[in-house]
């Protein structure tokens, strides 16, 4: 029984090390999404931080600020969701699909 427990503890430690390494790697990953047919581009990292927003001047209409705001909001939300999905998928590969509370 003690051997099984030691093996289990060793596996848990290995998983923890892999997850820490992956976490650092994911924080450095970047992805870019767009909205409005590419008029708005949003770049985020694996920590769901917005790194850049690019707005095509063609979609800037002073008489229609609401549309621009909606395009930016849509782009940011999509980028954050894709970043969360990227992190979740990468973590599930390490944990074997096991849901561990408090991880990302």
Image (cartoon, helix red, strand yellow):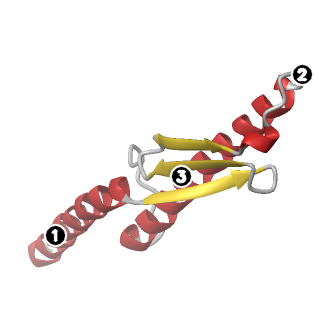
Whether residue 30 sits left or right of residue 9 in the image: it is right
Residue found at x 89% / y 26%:
64
Of labels 2 and 3, earlier in sequence is 2
Residue found at x 85% / y 32%:
67
Whether residue 67 sits left or right of residue 17 in the image: it is right
Which circle, 2 or 3, is nearer the viewer?
2
Separation (CA) of disc 2 from disc 1:
68 Å
Q: Which mark is residue 100?
A: none
Which circle, 1 or 3, is nearer the viewer?
3
Q: Locate residue 30: give its quadrant.
A: bottom left
Whether residue 38 sits left or right of residue 97 in the image: it is right
* Mark 3: few/some/many CA within 10 Å (<14, 14-19, 20+): some
Whether residue 94 sits left or right of residue 36 in the image: it is left
* Mark 1: few/some/many CA within 10 Å (<14, 14-19, 20+): few
Image position, residue 60 (x, y; %): 78, 34
Q: Locate residue 15: give its quadrant.
A: bottom left
For mark 2, what is the residue? 63
For mark 1, what is the residue? 5
For mark 3, what is the residue? 84
Between 50 and 46, the residue placed more toward the observer is 50
Extreme right residue here? 63
Residue found at x 10% / y 72%:
2
Image position, residue 75 (x, y; %): 69, 45
Between 29 and 58, the residue placed more toward the observer is 58
Image position, residue 96 (x, y; %): 42, 73
Image position, residue 95 (x, y; %): 38, 68
């Amino acid at each position: 029984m003690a051997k099984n427990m030691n093996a289990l503890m060793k596996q848990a430690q290995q998983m923890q090390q892999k997850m820490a390494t992956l976490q650092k790697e994911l924080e450095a990953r970047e992805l870019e999404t767009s909205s409005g047919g590419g008029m708005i581009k949003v770049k985020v990292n694996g920590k769901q931080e917005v790194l850049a927003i690019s707005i095509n001047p063609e979609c800037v209409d002073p008489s229609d600020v609401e549309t621009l705001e909606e395009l930016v909001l849509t782009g940011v939300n999509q980028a954050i969701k894709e970043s969360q999905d990227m992190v979740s998928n990468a973590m599930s590969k390490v944990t074997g699909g096991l849901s561990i509370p408090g991880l990302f």
